[in-house]
Image (cartoon, rainbow, N blue to C red):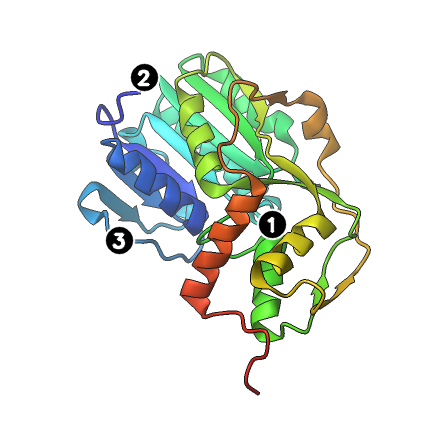
Amino acid sequence: MHWNQRPTLVVGDETLCSILSREIINRGAYVYYWAPVKSRIDMAYSSRMQIVSRDISTLTGSERFIRRSSLIFYMLSSEYLERNYEATLEFIRKITKSIASRIAKIIVTIPMEEGKVDLSELIEIFSENTQILGSIVALPSIYGPKISRGIIFEALKQLKEDPCKIRVQASPYSVEEFIYINDAMTAITKLLSRMKSVEIYRLTGDKVRVSSVIRRILAILGLDGFTQVTYTGKILRKNRKILEIAKELEWFKPSMRIGEGLRRTIDWFEATYGPILVCPRR
């Protein structure tokens, strides 16, 4: 992949986008970053990055940052997509029309958890333009440094507040699929060179019971047998439709196993928010 040939447009979540932007800028890309919602981003690469501040409703598709980009990543939360799905579809329609005269590749990522987003309309938009290679990638639970959501981060946040007890918003028997943030971004960038048609893919990670993840966190922190854990009993459900139609990225294998990934995540958390103490001062 020749990242320096044309600019790349990265749209969406500040954490995922900043990590992805850092990776592709290191490979020579120039990045336009646009956040439809209020956001901050690491400006360390500002010489090769332009931050776009626009309301989604005002975009026409003729904007320079859209017309110049031939690689587009669209990464937003399921909550945002569900609330703004029609606006998202309209935005992608504008993109596809504006790049009708050149070949472009678009990757849209969506969470694998249960949701109400209908992918058929998005696939139809991609299919209307033969110059566009569009892929939808369903992501498992992403964790790691700078990821401030999900079961792992929420557990660490509660333990920071009170290591004696935590409440986990899931059933201990729920099997969740976890992928380290760097592995997820590597898979997405590698997919660009393998895209040949409009497809839906599923990125896989480590399948682990929620209770096992919590036990591993407590063991790393030296809190095993000390912290009282309460589970809500909520079963974490996946989007069955995506599971039925998505192709697994069989050529990609994550390099980070859950044990080492948790240790690195805890190191980042404590460096950022302070140590999690067994007997914190009151």
Hey, which quadrant is residue 94 in on the image? top left
**Could you tell me residue 216's position as x and y percent?**
64, 53
Q: Nearer the viewer, residue 266 or 181?
A: 266
Q: Report which residue position mark 3 lands on.
A: 43
Q: CA distance from mark 3 to mark 1?
A: 26 Å
Q: Quadrant of the N terminus?
A: top left
Q: Residue furthest left?
A: 47
Secondary structure type for disc 2: loop
Q: Report which residue position mark 1 lands on.
A: 79
**Could you tell me residue 103's position as x and y percent?**
35, 16
Q: Nearer the viewer, residue 221 or 187?
A: 221
Q: CA distance from mark 1 to mark 2?
A: 32 Å
Q: Are marks 2 and 3 in contact (CB under 8 Å)?
A: no
Q: Please name the residue shown 82% across and 55% down the image.
A: 233
Residue 257 position (above or below residue 242): below
Secondary structure type for disc 3: loop
Secondary structure type for disc 1: helix
Q: CA distance from mark 2 to mark 3?
A: 30 Å
Q: Please name the residue shown 54% across and 29% down the image.
A: 137
Give, as a three-letter code, the residue at label 1: Glu
Q: Which mark is residue 102?
A: 2
Q: Are marks 3 and 1 in contact (CB under 8 Å)?
A: no
Give, as a three-letter code, the residue at label 2: Arg
Residues packed near mark 2 inside 10 Å, few (<14), some (14 to 19) or many (20 plus): few
Q: Nearer the viewer, mark 3 or mark 1?
A: 3
Residue 70 position (above or below residue 263): above
Q: Please name the residue shown 40% across and 50% down the image.
A: 55
Pointer 3 or 1: first along the chain: 3
Hey, which quadrant is residue 242 in on the image? top right
Q: Quadrant of the C terminus?
A: bottom right
Give, as a three-letter code, the residue at label 3: Met
